[in-house]
Image (cartoon, grey):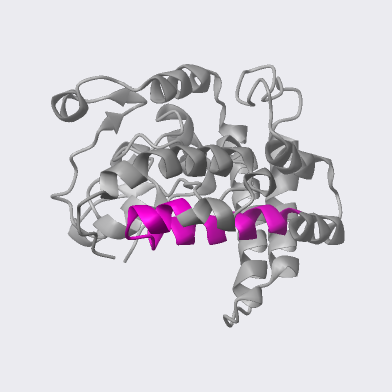
Amino acid sequence: MRLEFSDAQKAEIFVRDRGVCAFSGKSLWMLDYGVSPTYGIDWVDHIIPAARGGDNSTENGVCASHFYNSKKRDNSNDNKFMFRNGRPTSYFFYFYETLPLNIADHLSRFSQAQPSDWYFNRALFRFMLGVASIRARETGKVNKRDENYYAKSTLKILNKWKYLAMGSKSIHLRGLAPENCTDDQLALLKIAQFNDQEQLAEHMRACYPWFSTSCTAINLLAHANSPQEINSIAAQIDLEKLPARVASMMQKNLELLPAAYTNSEVVA
């Protein structure tokens, strides 16, 4: 029988681990990504899996991205954490040597995190699932859960967050919101103003173009197998229509990859 963590426990672990994936150090704070499909969401991982006798105490849980959580499954031998309790481990230093500035900045910012932040993060995740459901529909995939379903789900946890955060300092005052928010980050923050399911669904539809153009651009990049194909991508996408984070990512990769792919055979 799988012993699940409660929302309160997930929130406690998120704060303790400063909102980073224990396996990779990736930020699991949705707001950092704006309306970008490159986000990672926290999915508490059992250190000792329930199948091997592990319980659902907070001591038996670590903050992990959904990618690593699903990859690990019930493998308790894969507990080589790069981060524990919001700090780099010896595994990290032996492997990477130096802490990147972006991770150091994140760990510093999230010393100010509080349990209610997890609920806002979860509301943003459900909002983005609604945005992603529109793309699924647009690309012909069968998906019973549409933006209206996720709008209702978002509103439910958003109301929980508003109740728990009442009287607390805002995420802006605690440094969890970027100093200079991009337009798509501001769009995510805007969901805090909504009290209506239809408003949320409509806002998902308004944010969808950012998400869709990002997926298209990233897929083009992933399937390019030569410098010529990399260079041709620049003519196929409009960086100004991408979320700021994705535009920056694309620009850097389009500069670096042609030289990396020169005189080499790339396997798709």
Is the magenta region chiefly helix, strand or loop? helix
The image position of residue 191, as x and y in percent, is 77, 45
Using the image as rendered, state which of residue 138 and residue 7 is in the foreground.
138
Q: Say if residue 98 shows up in the picture.
A: yes
The image position of residue 264, as x and y in percent, is 20, 54
Displayed quadrant of residue 137? bottom right
Left or right placement of residue 13 versus residue 216 in this view: left
> In this picture, is 128 found above or below 39?
below
Q: Say if residue 29 shows up in the picture.
A: no
Q: Which quarter of the rendering shows the C terminus?
A: bottom left
Left or right placement of residue 35 versus residue 106 in this view: right
Residue at screen point 62% across, 38% down: 244
Over which residues does the magenta segment extend? 207-231
Using the image as rendered, state which of residue 21 and residue 132 is in the foreground.
132
Q: Exactly how many numbered labels are in the figure? A: 0
Using the image as rendered, state which of residue 144 and residue 249 is in the foreground.
249
The image position of residue 234, as x and y in percent, is 53, 50
